[in-house]
Amino acid sequence: MGEERGARAAYAHALAVLRVRGRALAVALLPAAFAVVLLTGAATGHLPGAGWDAARWAVSALAAVALVAGAAVATVIVRARPALTPTVEIPEASAPDLYRMVRDLAGRLDVPVPSGIALTPDCDSWLEDRTHPAHGRPAVPGLHRSDTPPVLVIGSPFLWWMRVTELRAVLAPVVAGTGPSAHPDIAAARRFVRGLDAAVAVADRPGLDPVRRLGARFVGAVARVLLRGCRGHAAEMERGVAAAASERAQAVDYGLRIVAQEQVGLAYAGWDRLLTRVALPAWRMGRWPSRLDAGVVSALTELSRRDRLAEGFTSRLGERPACDLLEEPGLVDEATSLLAARLFHGGHAEVGPDWAPVDWQRYPDEVVDRKWRTEAARLHRVLDRLGVDQDAEATLARVMDHLSTTRTGETLAAAITAEVSREATAGAPLPGAEPGAPAAGPDGPAGAPDPRPSQDPAGPRAAPALQDPDLPDPAGPRAAPALQDPALQDPALPAPDVPAPDVPAPDVPAPDLPSAPPPISVPGDIDHAAWGPAGDALPLFPLQPPRSGRELLADHVTAMVCCAAVDTAGAEPGLDWLDGPTLLVGGKRHPDLAARILSLIEDADPEPLRSWLATVGVRPEKPVRLV
C-alpha cells in the first residue's frame, strides 16, 4: 500500500471497521457458545439437575434464534445491491486512446489499472466499485471478483472542455486511488460499509409482502446500529485514502494540475448554468438537446467574451481536446445528453414525437417559440376564467390593461398557479412523459422523489450544432451576441413553465426523428437497473425548486411580450448560451425588458413597457398567434 501520508491511518481505520463487524459476529455467536458449554456439561455429568436442564433448553432456543437472525442479517448485507451511479460505460474499443492514457497514468503511479471507464453528466470524477454480483459486471479474467479494480467515472463535460494534458493531470489523483482500493483490509471494510448502506434501504423495496417487509425492517435496524458504530472510522479511512492518493499523484503533472483545477471550476459553472437556463426549458417542451457536452465549449467561449477575467481560457482551444480520445464523440455526447435528461427531468429512454432530440440550430423554433406561445395561451385562458374582457382577442394590450388597473398582480398570479396545478393534476402526460407516468408540474415531474445520492459523492449546452468542439466561434444563425455580463441574469427570459396539455403544437414543421442514440451501457437493463438496493429506476435530481406565483406571472407576461414582438415587429426567438431563451430584435438582445415587466406587475405602471414597445415597434393591439 505504500508509505504515503494517510496510508497507515487509512489501514488503521479499516481495521477498526472490520472490528465492528467482528464484534457483531461475536454477539450473534455468544448464545451458541453458552449453549455449547451447557450441553457439554450435561454430556459429561458436571451440570446435573432440573435447573440446569431448563437453562440448557432456554439458552439453546435463544442460540438457535440468534443464529437464524444473524444468518439472515448477514445474508441480506452480503446480497443487498449497493448503490450504483447512472453512467454511460465506455468500452475500450470505442476509446482506445483514453484507455491508453489511463493505463499510462496507472503505470507511472505504480497502481492497478481501473477495470473500466464510464462517463457521467456531472463535473466530477471518482472511482466506483462495481464488483458486486448484482451489478452484472463480468469479472476481469484471472482475478477474483473481489480483487477487481474499481471503475473510473469521469464527468463528461471535462472531456469536451479540457485539453488532453489537463485531463491527465486532473485524473492523476483519482487513478492513484486504485492503489489503496487494492489493499485487502480497506477493500473488505468498504464492502462491509456498502453492504450495510444497501441493507438499510431493503425495507423500502416495493413488492415485499408484510412478513418479508417486517424482516427487512429488522435487518435495517441492525444495519443502522452497525453503521453508527463504524461511520466515524469509515470517514477517516476515506480521508486517509484520499491523502495517500494525492501524495502519490504529486509525482505526475503536479504543476499542470494546479492550472487544470481552474478549468474544473469553470466547467462546473458553465455546466450548471446551461442545465438550468438552456437544457431545462427544452426538456419541459419534450425536447432534449443532443449535444450538451459540445455546448459547454460554446457557453464557456461566450463567457470568455463577456467576462474579461475569462479571456485567457479560450487560448487553450487550439490544443487537442480530450474528446478526441473517443472514437465517436458525437454518439457518446448524445448518450450522456439523454442520461442527463433522464436524471434531471425524468424523461424516458425511447425517442418519440413527444420526446425527441433537438440540435442547437432548431432550438429557437422547437423550444423557445413553443415555450412563449404555450405560456401566452395559458395566460389568456386564465384571463377568460377571471372574466377579464372575455370578448377581447388574444392581444398584449388586454394583458397590460388588466395589470395596469389592478394594484398588484397577486390575483392573476394565483390564478396562473392554480391553472398550472390543475394541468399537472389532470393526468395528461406532458411532452417527454411516459404513458402512465405522473403529470409534470410547473417545475418538474409531479411526485418526484427526493434526491438520494449514490454512495459515492459525485461531485449542458446551448448553441447551433458544433461540428468541432474546438471552434472558437460557435455562434449560429440565431445565437444571441454577447451584450452583457454573464453574472447579470435576465429574469425576463426564465425557464418555461409546463406547456398546457390541451393545446396543440405550434405551427412548426415536425422534427425528423433520428434513430435512438446508442444504448446507455450500464450493468443490467437500463430501465430496471438497480441504482439503489431496491432495484429502483433512475433517480431524479430536480434542478430548481418550484417557482412562486409572482415568478410564474412574470414568465407568462414575458412570453406574451415576446410573442407580440415576433408577430408584429419582426423579432425572432433566439438562444443565449448563458441565459437560455432570449428575444432578438434586429439581431440584438434587450436585457432591459425584465425591469419594465416587473414595473407593470408590481407597480401597475405600464408606461416603461409601452415606451419599450414603441421603440421596438411592437403593436400591442394586434392579436398574436398562440399554439
Image (cartoon, helix red, strand yellow):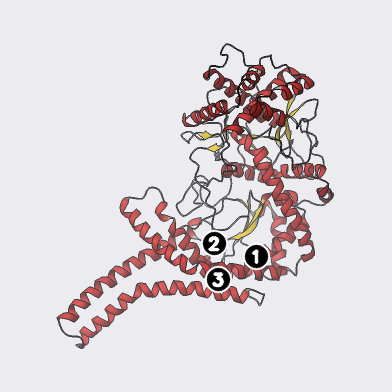
As helix, strand or loop, the secondary structure at mark 3 comes to helix
Q: Is residue 606 left or right of residue 549?
A: right
Q: For marks 3 and 2, give the one nearer the viewer.
A: 3
- Residue in the foreground of this view, choosing between 431 and 510: 431
Task: List x then y, in percent, for residue 187.
Answer: 54, 69
Of pointers 1 and 2, the one earlier in the residue sequence: 1
Q: Residue furthest left?
A: 50
Task: List x then y, in percent, for residue 545.
Answer: 57, 41
Judging by the rendered image, the residue that carries numbered circle 2 is 139
Residue type at tag 3: Ile
Residue type at tag 1: Val
Between the C-alphas of marks 3 and 2, the distance is 20 Å
As helix, strand or loop, the secondary structure at mark 2 comes to loop
In the picture, which quadrant includes the N terminus?
bottom right
Classify mark 2: residues with Cα within 10 Å, few (<14), some (14-19) or many (20+).
some
Classify mark 1: residues with Cα within 10 Å, few (<14), some (14-19) or many (20+).
many
Between the C-alphas of marks 1 and 3, the distance is 17 Å
Q: Residue at x 52, y 47 (%)?
A: 539
Judging by the rendered image, the residue that carries numbered circle 1 is 113
In the picture, which quadrant includes the C terminus?
top right
Task: List x then y, in percent, for residue 345.
Answer: 57, 40
Q: For marks 1 and 3, give the one nearer the viewer.
A: 3
Rendered image quadrant of residue 475: top right
Residue 112, placed above or below residue 56: above
Residue 212, placed above or below residue 108: above
Task: List x then y, in percent, for residue 613.
Answer: 75, 21
Judging by the rendered image, the residue that carries numbered circle 3 is 186
Q: For marks 1 and 2, give the one nearer the viewer.
A: 1
Q: Is residue 337 left or right of residue 68?
A: right
Q: Residue at x 80, y 34 (%)?
A: 481
